[in-house]
Image (tube, grey):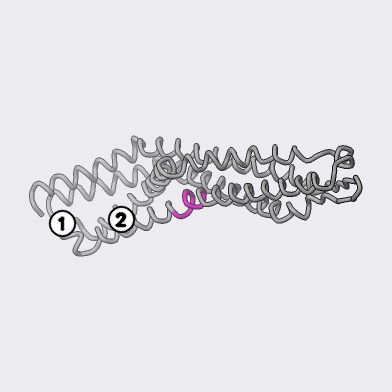
Amino acid sequence: MPPLARLILPLFVLLLAALAWLKPLDQLAETHAEAGLKRAVASFAAARALNAVISVVQGTEITGGVVVGVKLAPGQVLDPVNDLVEQFSTLMLAASIAFGAQLLLMQIGAGWLMAGAVSLAAVAWAGYALRGPPPAWLSRVLVALLLVRFIVPVAALTSEYAFQTFMAEEYQVHQRGIEQAADAFGALPAAEEAAKARWWELRERIDELKASAERIVDHTIRIAVVFLLQTLVLPFVVMWAMLQAARLLLSPTGQRA
């Protein structure tokens, strides 16, 4: 190992040990995870409110009778949408739990016990590295401890960065769409008003309900994709990449490099 690299690598490892105590990554990652948790809870609350409104509208059956009696049965139109909204609310609950689990894991990983274990391994590894190649078992222990300590904060920061860069605007648009969806059902006439309506006016109401239902489907699917990417796909990709990097470092080729 070149003399400069023999000095730089131990210093870098000791810097990582210092980061385990100072927690700059953890504080930033926890802030972002809490923001994600608030978004998931807001989407869950909006979905439950929309589900309640749809359930009320579903239970309405209105007959308009001028010349021809026509029944307006929103339940037939909205039943599939209501099922989708219920599934969406369950997904948002799962996303909230995922963000909560991230926060809990980061708090556990940032504890003094883990920081002390990382520091002991880092000091021992640096001491060996200044004299010669460290033992392979010590390198494995150090890499494993660093992964346990930093893998969750790094995954949380990466997923939040991807959200802010690529998905934030889309989320805001469709979240507002869900929150405002209940207003579309407020246009449904009361029973006594509908009884005076002409049959083609009730048909127009049905068409409006169908259009609103299509918009709700679009909003829920797009928000579901955002949360699946942020809480499942991106963290999994980041963790997989870090594990592969650790495996490469611990390979004979990586240790020689």
For the C terminus, the image quarter is bottom left
Nearest the viewer among 3 and 183 is 183
Q: Report the side of 39 relative to 68 (left or right).
A: left
> In this figure, which residue is indicated by the disc labeled 1?
133
Q: Residue at x 43, y 40 (%)?
A: 164
Residue 141 is marked as 2
Query: In the image, residue 30 lies at what x, y percent?
Result: 45, 38
Q: Residue at x 74, y 42 (%)?
A: 53
Query: Quick one: SS at disc 1?
Result: loop
Q: Residues within 10 Å of mark 2 (few under 14, many from 20)?
A: some
Q: Residue at x 85, y 41 (%)?
A: 197
- Based on the displayed image, in which of its 4 quarters is residue 116 positioned? top left
Nearest the viewer among 75 and 126 is 75
Q: Amino acid at mark 2?
A: Val
Tell me how far mark 1 sits from mark 2, CA to CA.
15 Å
Q: Report the side of 94 relative to 81 (left or right).
A: left
Compared to residue 168, the image places residue 253 above or below, namely below
For the N terminus, the image quarter is bottom left
Query: In the image, residue 135 lies at what x, y percent?
Result: 21, 58
Residue range (magenta): 227-233
Residue 76 is marked as none
Nearest the viewer among 125 and 13 is 13
Query: In the image, residue 245 lies at what x, y percent?
Result: 29, 57
Query: Quick one: SS at disc 2?
Result: helix
Q: Residue furthest front?
A: 67
Q: Earlier in the sequence, mark 1 or mark 2?
A: 1
Q: Amino acid at mark 1?
A: Pro
Compared to residue 85, the image places residue 27 above or below, namely above
Query: In the image, residue 87 lies at what x, y percent?
Result: 65, 53
